[in-house]
Image (cartoon, helix red, strand yellow):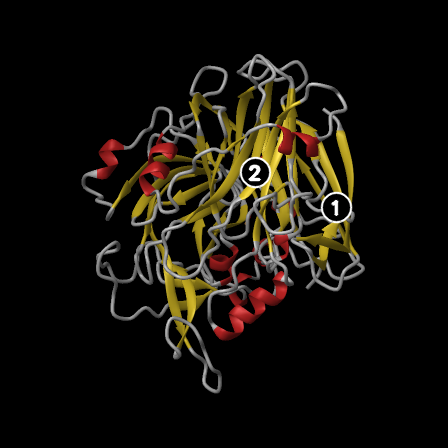
Amino acid sequence: SVTRHYKFDIKLKNVTRLCTTKSIVTVNGKFPGPRIIAREGDRVLVNVVNHVPNNMTIHWHGIRQLQNGWADGPSYITQCPIQTNQSYVYNFTIIGQRGTLFWHAHISWLRATVYGPLIILPKRHAPYPFPKPHKEVPIIFGEWWNVDTEAVISQALQTGNGPNVSNAYTINGLPGPLYNCSKKDTFSLKVKPGKTYLLRLINAAVNDELFFSIANHSLTVVEADAVYVKPFTTNILFITPGQTTNVLLKAKPQYPNATFLMLARPYFTGRGTFDNSTVAGILEYKEHSNSSSSTSLKSHPLFRPILPQINATSFVANFTSKLRSLANSRFPANVPKTVERRFFFTIGLGTNPCPKNQTCQGPTNTTKFAASMNNISFALPSVAMLQSHFFAQSNSVYSTDFPIIPPKPFNYTGTPPNNTNVNNGTKVVVLKFNTSVELVMQGTSILGAESHPLHLHGFNFFVVGQGFGNFDPNKDPSNFNLVDPVERNSVGVPSGGWVAIRFLADNPGVWLMHCHFDVHLSWGLRMAWVVQDGKLPNQKLPPPPSDLPKC
Ligand code: C2O
């Protein structure tokens, strides 16, 4: 294994999409940002230098950061932000992981433009558990606003209303030909007949779960969230923000006299506004090494894939139930078989009262939108929690009384309670080192049944069960899959349903868990787990690096 050095210069750059030019925050002037490529076992050093007026942090989404929370990145959780003209070196070693992940800004809504692939190749001479692909291609989904996204969220938080939806979805930063003024900004994948391609799909969209399909081609899913899965073939993929999926695409044996569109558009079940537009890219067979992509769109018939209905919840449930760990001797599924601590969290929207002397445009004009777990809407502290934890100064920064069950049980997927107001607080659950945890996350229908892609920092978890309606603690656990559940870092809490996960708290530190829709994250849909040090020296969180930013 080797050490890989990267430099991330955070700078402004004028970028034009949909005929609108705006100045965006980028890494090294690139949108999407540069790829990080490393091998399992490598150490990665990323020197992030902030040249923009905004504060910045970068999160290495899905990297376990074993005993290394100082490099995790969520602002005010594991570190104070990197201020203008300051820098911080993220220093982490990739242990026991290989596959596709991504990195993104973890402060305010800056990840709308600050994101890129993080690719972990297997150790040298360690083969994939599937045939070696001819080529590997990252496909990263995002969203584009014609206006400044920081203004979108600050205005929403001011008024208490939902933020403006994006103007386009993107593939590798490009909206594609179905949007106005966007033909030349089209992602094109050129393939050779008969060859197999590994597509590394990443959903970096800010607020949308997506369906994805390529016309006349099926895809074989081989990995999710940087863990291999039992391969299965599908025409349509479903991917939530925070999730990554590797698929094999086998090109047809001959040059077909046609061009194929790949499309992605959202899955959405809530009320309110959303963008039901479609990003398109092109799959092209390259007959001559220097054929230009613009000719084929015109000269061949164009095939379009069919995507599910926008609210196709049964498709989503069916797709996610197909994801299973390999669970073989080379890649075992180390599912905690016994559980030391059980938790039940309700996940959903709610309201905050409108402050006096303010006009609100939330669900009513006396309320603002909020979001909560067990009715607690997370209040971001002004100093980093991991530092407070490490130096044992927690009292003033956070409290350890996060409720482990909802304050009042109600019919979660039926009649919501009369009072939709949430409580605000910076509350955590404290876990002893190596506790085996089971967490059931129940979606609530307060202000509309919407699914929530929950992401856990610092761990992979096993998705042992999911279902619709109210979770039944007397019946549902008997159907849990403890044999080959999928292991991942982000999971959709189904609209009008629940999901059960298990993980081993073997990583000391402060670990954020949150909805990966930035709108819900901004409304407080997050909490943190504090995992205490173990007794042995290799079970402790080491002291912070000397360049850790100060608040
Ligand atoms: Cu990808 Cu806390 O996020």
Counting every numbered tag in the picture gives 2
The residue depicted at 37 percent of the width and 68 percent of the height is 422
The quadrant in which the N terminus is found is top right
Look at label 1 and name its amino acid: Lys
The residue depicted at 48 percent of the width and 87 percent of the height is 357
67 relative to 73, above or below? above
Instruction: Measure the alpha-carbon separation of dots 2 and 1.
Output: 17 Å
The quadrant in which the C terminus is found is bottom right
Q: Find residue 270 and report its image quarter.
A: bottom left
Q: Nearer the viewer, residue 207 or 255?
A: 255
Residue tagged 1 = 30
Label 2: how many Cα within 10 Å (few below 14, some 14–19, many 20+): many
Q: Nearer the viewer, residue 449 or 65?
A: 449
Look at label 2 and name its amino acid: Ile
Residue 202: give its label: 2
Horizontal side of 214 relative to 417 (left or right) equals right
Q: Nearer the viewer, residue 434 or 501?
A: 501
The residue depicted at 38 percent of the width and 69 percent of the height is 351
Horizontal side of 479 relative to 495 (left or right) equals left
